[in-house]
Image: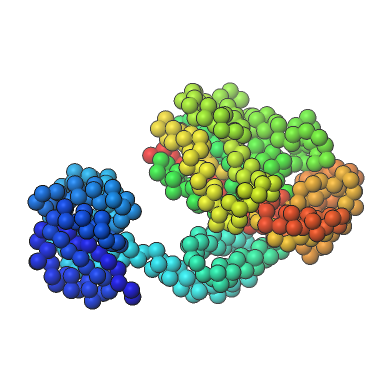
Amino acid sequence: MSQVKILWVDDQIDLLKSHIIFLNEKGYQIDTCTNGNDAIEKITNNRYQAVLLDENMPGLSGIETLIQIKKIDRNLKVIMITKSEEENIMEDAIGKEISDYLIKPVNPNQILLSLKKNLKDKKLIMDSNISDYQQEFRKLSIKMMSINSWSEWIELYHEIIDWELKLSDVNDITMMEILNNQKSEANSLFSKFIELNYEQWIKKNDSPPLSNNILEKYLINELNEKPLILIVIDNLRYDQWRVIEPSILDFYNKEREVPYFSILPTSTQYARNSLFSGLMPKEIKDKFPQFWKDDHEDGGKNLFESKLLENNLSRFRNKNLKHEYHKITNLKNGIKLSTNLKQSLQNGLTTIVYNFVDMLSHSKTEMEMIKELASNDKAYRSLTYSWFINSPLFEIIKSASEYGFKLIITTDHGTINVKNPTKIIGDRNTSQNLRYKTGRSLTCNEKDNLIFNNPHEILLPKTSLNSSYVFAKEDFYLVYPNNYNHYSNYYKNTYQHGGVSMEEMIIPFIVLNPK
């Protein structure tokens, strides 16, 4: 191992020679000094990876020295070593961003472990994750070949996400290709599973929680005690939830996590209307024709979500339940709601639809800058996280915890990075979505798509007597033959939804209590 340069600051450094020899043998180069002023001079003139700093020294104290060190290099790792176990000293040191805190007497292995943890942890973790995934690869491959239930698919998808997050910082192109290929294989098998089982799910046979029943199963019973906020983040994938979850858990405790399945098509018009209404799209069109527009019709397709939700709630709860609905589509409205959230304490339920993530995914198609910023899933997650922690939505969640709101966070569907074009032919009234089409006389590659010639079998509305639905599987996207090469290239590596994939269909429903 190449030597790592360490500065050890202690007024009794002569008593630590055996410790220094031990660290030298482990590959660490140790410079020493006996006071804070000398330490500051050495750090100014030399490049160190870490500082071992005694707290109790004549002249500048350890805390005072620490403050000066951070002014020189705020990223330098400082491990404080002290005889004192006083809580105020620990808190002061932690507040000044020390990397670790050790109590004297310390043995050489304690120091070695702290240095490894603070200097080598990333590499050690990366190496360990690569090794673990190599061992787990075959087990995952065998597991996905034998899955025969929706709960097992949820479990497998979560395992893949876990590996994706663990390996996301590994600069090993080969390993990431292996993982991505394994996920592609999983999506291929998942599509076959959906093809075999989806129609039976709609007929209520061994169905997982779906868009049309998730609120009935898991929200209605929560409307009994403290005021509740339901947040629907449009187009939130499970891996995106995983990266924002730790920030939320600083303010909330997770009571329950229920992965559920979006209905087909995995698009806002269908899935979110189904979520709020507690009905399948055909049932919405039949019962509330004034609230439904078919794909080819002009006008907004999600303009009556609050009405559909009110009707849904009234079927299971007292009609006098006080409820507010907010759809946030811009920064100004988000800030306004955050500022006025306390007023919602009078409501039994406050529903918030937040559209930013969906806007982000569509922007990647339309804007070159976003294409660069969200070039792959890792970057897409990172962009989501950066937005979230600086968004009014996060401020709403923090305020909600302070006011004592119970919280449910969910989404209507996910999205997938599409890679492979597949041709489709339809008439002029065929829908425009890249992951599904509905219309008459649709012709496509059956291998790449899931086809339902009788939409009523899966409770989807017909636009005409002989209309059908086509759903793209895996990472395919539907392109017309006219100007095929241009549109294939234009939409390649963009985030789309509406079709059949784990990323689009398996989505989170999270119940949280304020800390």
Between 25 and 48, the residue placed more toward the observer is 48
Between 242 and 130, the residue placed more toward the observer is 130
| Residue 203 visible | no
- From the viewer's perspective, is residue 20 above or below residue 332? below
Quadrant location of the N terminus in the rendered image: bottom left
- From the viewer's perspective, is residue 204 above or below residue 120? above
Instruction: Report the residue at 55% width, 69% height from top.
Output: 173
* 386 on left or right of 177: left
Instruction: Report the residue at 64% width, 32% height from top.
Output: 309
- From the viewer's perspective, is residue 17 above or below residue 158? below
Where is residue 353? Give x, y as percent.
60, 36
As drawn, the residue found furthest toward the front would be 45
Quadrant location of the C terminus in the rendered image: top left
* 440 on left or right of 235: right
Where is residue 422? Give x, y as percent.
79, 60
* 316 on left or right of 58: right
| Residue 243 visible | yes
Where is residue 228? Give x, y as percent.
50, 33
Q: Quadrant of residue 280?
A: top right
Q: How was this image coloured?
A: rainbow
- From the viewer's perspective, is residue 173 above or below residue 366? below
Instruction: Report the residue at 44% width, 48% height from top.
Output: 246
Between 325 and 217, the residue placed more toward the observer is 325
Q: Quadrant of residue 200?
A: bottom right
Numbered circles on residues, count = 0
Instruction: Report the residue at 17% width, 59% height from top.
Output: 9
Between 203 and 513, the residue placed more toward the observer is 513
